[in-house]
Image: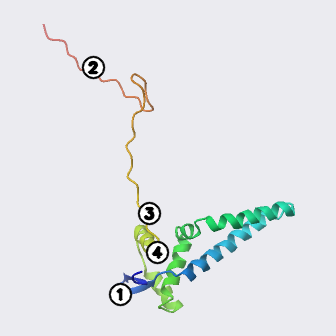
Amino acid sequence: MGQRYVVVNIDGEDKKFHKMTPYDRMEVMEAQKKIARAEIEAGCAKLPAEQAFVELANFDKAFLRSDVIGDYIRSAAGRLDTYRRALEKSYSKEQAETILRAFTPTEDEELALTFELWGIALPKEEPKKEEKDETAYGEEGPNPQKPAEETYTPPAT
């Protein structure tokens, strides 16, 4: 399983960011579910009881299959909470806050660290495909070509 933390150099000092555990996953998922369910319940307040029950049951089933952690770590608040959790396993809350205020990664570095802390492979960018001109001979496509400029010069007589 490898090392249980990632070392990041911040202001010339190495800091340990501990990787997330199954307990961290469960806590985050439960917290996110609670927030989302409260929103659904508020939306169901005006519905008949039977319909509200069905809506909530559907939410509970769908929530288990949703990418809660992925959505969470793609948000700025989720990444910050991840770093706070990771640091507070080795440092006090005050120390973790100080470290985070000095932490200035690029967006790519931030995403790479977050994905590594959660044990998720960082999605790779797919190379862009060249667009093919699928118009038939003689048809003009979405970007018609300009006719070539006339370059013929008659011979001098």
Task: Please rate how many residues cluster around mark 3, counting C-alpha atoms within 10 Å: few if below 14, some from 14 to 19, many from 20.
Answer: few
Q: Is residue 63 left or right of residue 25?
A: right
Q: Is residue 94 left or right of residue 57?
A: left
Against 41, is 22 above or below? below
Q: CA distance from mark 2 to mark 4?
A: 63 Å
Q: CA distance from mark 3 to mark 4?
A: 12 Å
Against 116, is 125 above or below? above
Against 51, is 144 above or below? above
In the image, what residue type sits under mark 1?
Answer: Glu
- The residue depicted at 45 percent of the width and 32 percent of the height is 142
Closer to the chain start, of discs 3 and 2, is 3
Q: How is the image coloured?
A: rainbow
- The residue depicted at 22 percent of the width and 17 percent of the height is 152
Q: CA distance from mark 1 to mark 4?
A: 24 Å
Which of discs 1 and 4 lies nearer the camera? The answer is 4
Q: Which residue is mark 4?
A: 119
Q: Which residue is mark 1?
A: 13
| Residues under numbered marks 3 and 2 in contact, where contact means CB atoms less than 8 Å apart | no
Closer to the chain start, of discs 3 and 1, is 1
Label placed on residue 123 = 3
